[in-house]
Each structure stands twice: as structure tokens, then as C-alpha cells.
Amino acid sequence: PTLDEAVRLMAKTQIGKTLTDDQAQDLVAFLNSLTGEFPEQTMPRLPGTPGNSVISDDTGSTTD
């Protein structure tokens, strides 16, 4: 499917609306304007809970 078809389908299924041609074209133009690369993200290191960890340490092991 094209982006136009996907926009129209999502509007119909998610909000129960049929878009006009102008509305669909505006949404497609907006979505096509979203360019660029995602910045690199890393998970933050959470503060420890005594005797318990919900994330693995540098060796890949976890403690419960």
C-alpha cells in the first residue's frame, strides 16, 4: 500500500473518520517531511537497590 492508503486506513480504523483528499494529502506531506536519522540512545544506569538488580551488570549477569 501507499502512504496515502495507509493514512486513510489508519484514520478509518483508529478514529472512524473518512479523510477528505486535502486532509490525506496534508498528512502525507507532513509524514514525508519527517527526515533525518535517529540520534544514538543508551539506556541510563539505574540506581541500585540493595541486594536486588533489575538490569544486568557489565558481565551480563543479574542478581535477584
Image (spheres, helix red, strand yellow):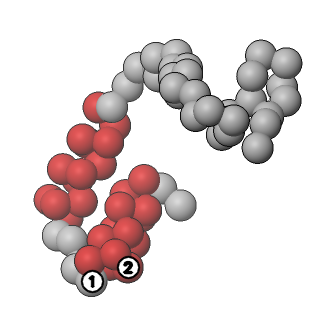
* Along the line of sight, the residue nearer the viewer: 49 or 7: 49
Question: From what the image shows, is residue 58 above or below residue 48?
Answer: above
Rendering quarter of residue 55: top right
* Along the line of sight, the residue nearer the viewer: 54 or 1: 54
Spot occupied by residue 21 in the image (x, y as percentages of width and height): 20, 64
Rendering quarter of residue 8: bottom left
Q: Amino acid at mark 2?
A: Thr
* Along the line of sight, the residue nearer the viewer: 23 or 14: 14
Question: From what the image shows, is residue 48 above or below residue 63?
Answer: above
Q: Amino acid at mark 1?
A: Gly
Residue 45 located left or right of residue 30: right
Q: Residue at x 24, y 51 (%)?
A: 27
Question: From what the image shows, is residue 27 above or below residue 37?
Answer: below
Rendering quarter of residue 29: top left
Marks 2 and 1 in Cβ contact (< 8 Å): yes
| Local secondary structure at mark 2 | helix
Spot occupied by residue 13 in the image (x, y as percentages of width and height): 38, 79
Spot occupied by residue 56 in the image (x, y as percentages of width and height): 74, 30
Looking at the rendered structure, which numbered label has been put on residue 16?
1
Marks 2 and 1 sit apart, C-alpha to C-alpha, by 6 Å
Image quadrant containing the C terminus: top right
Q: Residue at x 38, y 69 (%)?
A: 10
Residue 63 seen by the camera: yes
Q: Residue at x 52, y 16 (%)?
A: 40
Instruction: Please tell me how many numbered marks the rendered image carries.
Output: 2
* Along the line of sight, the residue nearer the viewer: 25 or 37: 37
Residue 35 located left or right of residue 37: left
Question: From what the image shows, is residue 63 above or below residue 18?
Answer: above
Looking at the rendered structure, which numbered label has been put on residue 13?
2
